[in-house]
Amino acid sequence: MDADYDSKQVMGQNSGRAIIHVDMDAFYASVEQRDNPDIAGQPVMVGGLGGRGVVAAASYEARRFGVRSAMPMMRARALCPNGVYLAPRMSHYREVSRAIFKVFEAFTPMVEGLSLDEAFLDVTGSVRLFGGVRAIGRDIQQRISRETGLVASIGMASNKFLAKLASDAEKPAGFVWVPAEGVSAFLDPMPVGRLWGIGKKTEPRLRQLGVLTIGQLRTAEPEALRSALGNRTEHFLALARGEDERPVSPGRAEKSISHEVTFEQDLTDPREMKAELQQQTEAVMKRLRAKNLAARTVHLKIRDHRFHSVTRSRSIRTASNRTETVFKLANGLLGRWLEEHANTPVRLLGVGVSGLEAAQGASAGVDRMVDQIEERYGDGTLTRGLTLERGKRGGRS
Ligand SMILES: [Mg+2]
């Protein structure tokens, strides 16, 4: 146990936790640069290349031109006309992500994945064994570098809120620890917009009150803040003091749910493929709803008779756990593939969802009812829409 952790333990009850936030730097773009030395050191944009595409990741070289992620690709091309523009290779990034998460799991089972390249780790129970939270953070950063050749930024603190701000504070290759006695020095100079939940509406109202920084918010009269923050005043004051009790929930580390079938005989009839896809989507969505999760991305996997595999993805505008929504998107992906590969026998079909988050409200009422009926009477009592009769030749892989 090192001195820094000792000093934290004597402060307040919850400062006893040791939380690490790991965030890979320009993840997709860095993977592409690692895989292709010709574009290392060049401005690289990964994202949708079509007319309405958006930048998913921009290398640090590209950021010098003002390119940012979530920016329309057209705008990126205007800012950086000589950059390298690439379509994302999601299944490849997922593979790299698995290697990164394996590193996390060497230190703690308490890993909450936020995306392919970002996670919270609760290492409170591992601190003694590994010699302090900073020793763990350094070890994670080095192991990721050694095993994937990629750069991670590491934030360490007593809770999620502070750890996340810390990982962001000195990107790229950041390594920032916020000790209990250093919380005010760390937070106070930051703009109030850095507090979770203070958005574009609230920030101007705070500015009118003369509150520009987190420090000014922390020391303001609560009564004066109420006009801008209402009944969330106490919540934001706690955040401004660096207090955040939310636990790291490994349940969310589940990054995707999928289902696939390799057929004993290749499928050639598009209607049969569609029926298969519908059944698989039902199965996937049932598992998703059972975990009270919703998904942001739909994936379709196809392997043809020559063992040529493709994975195609589409994102959902707002996270969903409705079978119909996901089936529509998966079926659209299948339709496009069929247009390009008419009469190609299909050996394997799979559907999956990722970008998982906690489900909001009762968005899937009908689906949930079906789930419950099926639970009572066994699978297949109710089958919606089209399901073609076909022999039992599906096998799981
Ligand atoms: Mg990242």
Image (spheres, rainbow, N blue to C red):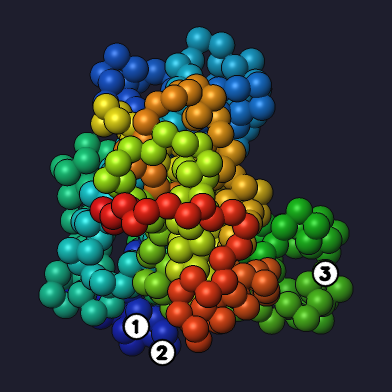
Chain-order first, disc 3 or disc 2: 2
Chain-order first, disc 3 or disc 1: 1
Q: In this orientation, which residue lies closer to the viewer: 370 or 216?
A: 370
Reading the image, the residue beneath label 1 is: 16
User: As displayed, is residue 367 above or below residue 140?
Assistant: below
Q: Secondary structure at mark 2?
A: loop
Residue type indicated by callout 1: Gly
Q: Are marks 2 and 1 in contact (CB under 8 Å)?
A: yes
Reading the image, the residue beneath label 3 is: 228
Residue 208 in percent (x, y) is at 85, 59
Residue 282 in percent (x, y) is at 51, 61
- Crowding around mark 3 (Cα neighbors within 10 Å: few <14, some 14 to 19, many 20+) is some
Residue 196 in percent (x, y) is at 61, 64
Q: CA distance from mark 3 to mark 1?
A: 33 Å
What residue appears at the point 28 percent right and 55 percent down from the top-left corner?
Answer: 395
**Where is residue 1, by image quadrant?**
bottom left
User: As displayed, is residue 281 above or below residue 197?
Assistant: above
Q: Is mark 3 within 8 Å of ligand 1?
A: no
User: As displayed, is residue 110 above or below residue 52?
Assistant: below
Direction from residue 175 to residue 50 in the image, left or right: right
**Where is residue 225, by image quadrant?**
bottom right
Reading the image, the residue beneath label 2 is: 13
